[in-house]
Image (cartoon, rainbow, N blue to C red):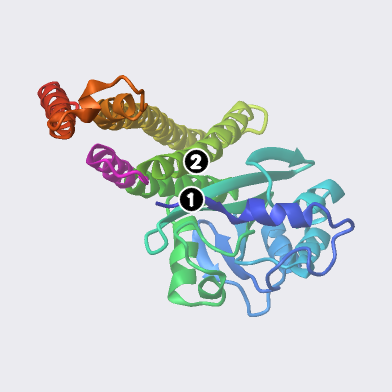
Amino acid sequence: MSRVRDRAGRMAGRRRHSSPPTADAVHGSDEHVTRFVTDGQVSEAPEGATAADARAFGDKTPAQMALLLYPDPSETAIRDLADAWDLHPILVEDLLHAGQRPKLERYRDVLFLVVRSAHYDDEREEVDLAEFHVLVRPGAAAVLCQDGVWIDGTTADALAGSGADAERILGSLLDGDLLHLGPEAIAYRLLDAIVDGYAPVLHEVGIDKEQIERQVFSGDPAVAERIYRLTQEVIDVQHATSWLVEVLGGLRSGFDKHEVAEDLQTYLQDVADHLDRIGALIAEYREALTQILSVNSTLVAERQNEDMKKISGWAAILFAPTLVAAIYGMNFQNMPELHWSFGYPLAIAVMVAFSIGLYRVFKAKRWM
């Protein structure tokens, strides 16, 4: 059974105590992948294109925008992005310090999203939560993989450059008929991919739950720990999705104020509906695990009760000959049986008879 491994959360403890951030406050590299979009058509950016180049490209005309993907951003890469995009100092601080709960914030004309995806590692039988920071400004969007992995577990090394994995992931963000609506479409595509990624995770969790149900009725004493660990996984995933519900709610509440296109509103509504179904399934799993734990506790109590019956029965059986032996072991002078030639065989016979009689009684009552 697995336990949820939230690497962003573990690193947060180290990062939050570094003030100001040092060179090792953020792991990773300076590499990033850039794509330009013109009238919904995607093209590769010139080699060596910087965050400033991406901003300049997106600022030329409303029909142009740029996407920057940081597979594993270093502090230098984040500061270069902050300088090129003139990001607010508080926003820069958030980018430098990962391990945050999902949220939505706006700094002037920049939308900042923190979201978490889930991926089930079948080899380790663990659920990994990965943190993403998303920046959306007029004409450009940036996606920072704070844990160095993509939604499906693809590593930063595979994302960097122009390999098949990088093209597949960039294609998933830049695919569809919504690109002409601006960089918000990229953010919405990412949210959709993250929500879709929870479904296979819950499928694997469901398999674990079924295994636990069979294990409970087999009497395996190790099942309680599996129940607790799987429950912890479900709780962590539930927290990530519940916070994501707040993020989607914040985006939807700003539709009118920020004049979001109707097609994007419809798309995000579909993502929200899918997330609601995911949330309902998580709640169902959590309730089922609570019931399984209750059933397991009842079965454990029953087994303990059966054990106590057997222990009590054997104690009573052993008590009978002990009582006879104790009486004749008191060595009173006036005990005729002690001087009778049949006294010893009779005492032994009484002990055996008592023991056999009690055994048959307890056996009939199913205590043995």
| Left or right of 143, for residue 23 | right
Pick the residue in front: 50 or 322.
322
- For the residues labelled 2 and 1, the Cα–Cα distance comes to 7 Å
The magenta region covers: 206-222
Residue 330: x and y, percent? 37, 26
Q: State the mark number for residue 332.
A: none
Report if residue 59 lies within the magenta region.
Answer: no
- Judging depth in this view, the residue of 263 and 247 nearest the camera is 247
Disc 2 designates what residue?
232
Which residue type carries mark 1?
Arg
**Residue for point 86% across, 50% down:** 89
Local SS, label 1: loop
Report whether 300 appears left or right of 173: left
x, y (%) of residue 72? 63, 67
Quick one: quadrant of the C terminus? top left
Q: Which residue is mark 1?
A: 3
Can I make out residue 189 in this image?
Answer: yes
Contact flag, marks 2 and 1 (Cβ < 8 Å)? yes
Query: Which SS does the magenta portion mostly show?
Result: helix
Image: 133 above or below 84: above
